[in-house]
Image (tube, grey):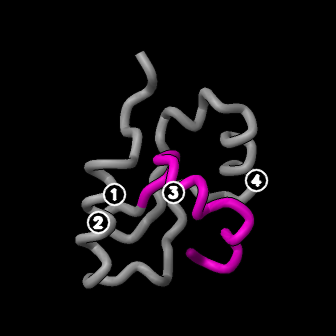
Amino acid sequence: MAPNCSLGCDSLYGRGYITVDEAGRIRVSPLADTMPGVHEHIQQQHLADRAVPWSAKEREPHFRWHRAHTFEPDPPA
């Protein structure tokens, strides 16, 4: 992931708290709001809606898979 995310974005991405949309911007799961430490880290790093420079057309299939299988788009019921 991006250098200024090395302290946690890989973990946030892997657990479905963030993803990269089709436009190459970071999207935050509503689930993150239910996790105080996660929410705080996302806010401190200004991750929501941040454009990622390493997003490329050839990476979109991976991001699409992640959005469908890992990202948590809905808050817990």
Q: Amino acid at mark 1?
A: His
Q: CA distance from mark 4 to mark 1?
A: 24 Å
Between residue 7 and residue 55, name the one nearer to us: 7
Direction from residue 22 to residue 38 in the image, left or right = right
Q: CA distance from mark 2 to mark 4?
A: 24 Å
Circles 4 and 1, Cβ within 8 Å, touching? The answer is: no
Q: Look at mark 2 in the image and give the residue it sits on.
A: 22
Q: Nearer the viewer, mark 2 or mark 1?
A: 1
The residue depicted at 60 percent of the width and 56 percent of the height is 11
Give the total of numbered labels.
4
Q: Which mark is residue 66?
A: 1
4 magenta-colored = yes
SS of the residue under disc 1: helix
Direction from residue 17 to residue 6 in the image, left or right = right
Comes first in the chain, label 4 or label 1: 4
Q: Nearer the viewer, mark 3 or mark 2?
A: 3
SS of the residue under disc 4: helix
The image position of residue 21, as x and y in percent, is: 35, 61
Direction from residue 37 to residue 33 in the image, left or right = left
